[in-house]
């Protein structure tokens, strides 16, 4: 069956009416040994859907910027990172924090400003970090994280430490002048920085054509003699393989690298769906976790590559049995 033949089922798996019921179960990180990065990617969607249900119930005082639709990219970055690497994020860090966390409960507790939260109830959502998992910095200030990433990479160079720094940005934040300055600085000093541009063609309530001219990242990177690659298609296997190769190249050549990945933001800007008045999306927990048709939804692509039986087996494990 071709990936394009998969359609969303639309049937609701189970309706959540009280968000308290969402956090009573075992929400530990699924076994990588048993289910691989494919299982982790499915769980990442599930966790976001659970938090989205809590957002509908107004469970948090803080805004939560989910990244439903970016699971293939985020899972690939999670697979790439080693204990020597550092991850520098934006305000839309929820998906990355979920991918790196040992459980969802500590993140929910943080969003609820509880002392047992991942940041002891002090960091909230848009600045949430997890240093033990390599997430060194998250910023709610647009473009602020580029300079921090360069500083961290410069420190690695001076102290002769291993690893790379991966800094995440979007097609909106890369419009800031600090982005080009960071490209120049990192290339001038041969810093091991991976500039990851998550291009979902969405910033607040505007698309790229609605707010600016096209920016050719290949040409911009080339202007400072920086390697560049663009990925699209949401194939997690391809993303894992190619992004690991990129990390190896950064280390071997002692060079920064710019990677642009085209994704789809299936939950629009922030909060539950529908969110903004013009937001027509309505995200629910369905029996297969799919929101959009292939190839827009990375889980639809995954379902195609895994086969429906294997795919649904992971979902059954997540929904009906304790995680390993």
Image (tube, grey):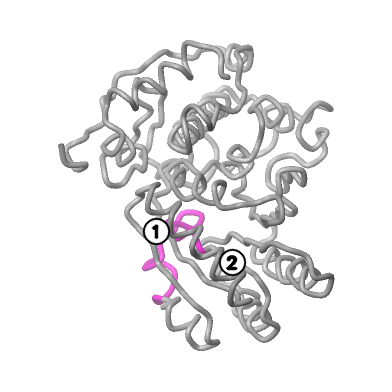
Residue in the image at 71% along x and 43% along y: 133
Tell me the element at label 1. Answer: strand
Query: Quadrant location of residue 22?
Result: top right
Residue 229 in percent (x, y) is at: 43, 70
Callout 2–callout 1 Cβ contact below 8 Å: no
Residue 155 in percent (x, y) is at: 81, 70
Residue 245 in percent (x, y) is at: 48, 62
Residue in the image at 66% along x and 63% along y: 164
Magenta span main SS: loop
Query: Quadrant location of residue 281?
Result: top left
Tell me the element at label 2. Answer: strand
Residue in the image at 41% along x and 23% along y: 314
Is the residue marked by circle 1 packed among few (<14), some (14-19), or many (20+) residues within 10 Å? some
Q: Is residue 136 above or below residue 212?
A: above
**Which disc, if any, is residue 194?**
2
- In the picture, the quarter occupied by the N terminus is top left
Magenta-highlighted residues: 197-214
Q: Give whichever of discs 2 and 1 has the lower sequence position.
A: 2
Residue 142 in percent (x, y) is at: 65, 63
Depth check: give the residue in front, 278 or 270. 270
Q: Nearer the viewer, mark 2 or mark 1?
A: 2
């Amino acid at each position: 069956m071709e990936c394009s033949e998969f359609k969303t089922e639309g049937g609701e798996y189970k309706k959540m009416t009280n968000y308290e019921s969402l956090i009573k179960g075992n929400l530990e990180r699924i076994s990588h040994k048993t289910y691989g990065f494919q299982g982790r990617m499915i769980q990442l969607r599930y966790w976001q859907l659970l938090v989205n249900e809590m957002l509908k119930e107004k469970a948090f005082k803080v805004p939560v910027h989910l990244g439903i639709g970016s699971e293939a990219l985020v899972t690939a970055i999670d697979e790439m990172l080693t204990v020597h690497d550092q991850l520098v994020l934006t305000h839309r860090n929820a998906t990355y924090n979920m991918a790196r966390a040992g459980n969802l409960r500590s993140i929910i507790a943080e969003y609820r400003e509880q002392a047992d939260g991942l940041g002891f109830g002090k960091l909230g959502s848009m600045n949430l970090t997890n240093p033990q998992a390599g997430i060194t910095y998250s910023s709610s200030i647009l473009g602020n994280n580029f300079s921090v990433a360069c500083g961290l990479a410069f420190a690695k160079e001076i102290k002769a430490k291993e690893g790379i720094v991966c800094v995440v940005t979007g097609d909106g934040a890369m419009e800031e002048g600090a982005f080009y300055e960071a490209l120049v600085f990192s290339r001038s000093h041969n810093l091991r920085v991976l500039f990851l541009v998550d291009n979902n063609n969405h910033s607040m309530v505007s698309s790229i054509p609605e707010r600016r001219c096209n920016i050719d990242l290949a040409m911009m990177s080339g202007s400072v003699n920086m390697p560049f690659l663009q990925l699209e298609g949401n194939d997690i296997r391809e993303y894992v393989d190619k992004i690991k190769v990129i990390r190896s190249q950064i280390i071997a050549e002692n060079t920064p690298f710019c990677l642009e990945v085209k994704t789809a933001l299936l939950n629009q800007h922030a909060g539950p769906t529908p969110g903004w008045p013009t937001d027509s999306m309505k995200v629910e927990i369905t029996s297969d976790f799919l929101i959009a048709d292939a190839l827009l939804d990375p889980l639809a692509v995954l379902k195609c590559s895994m086969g429906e039986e294997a795919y649904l087996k992971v979902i059954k494990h997540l929904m009906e049995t304790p995680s390993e």
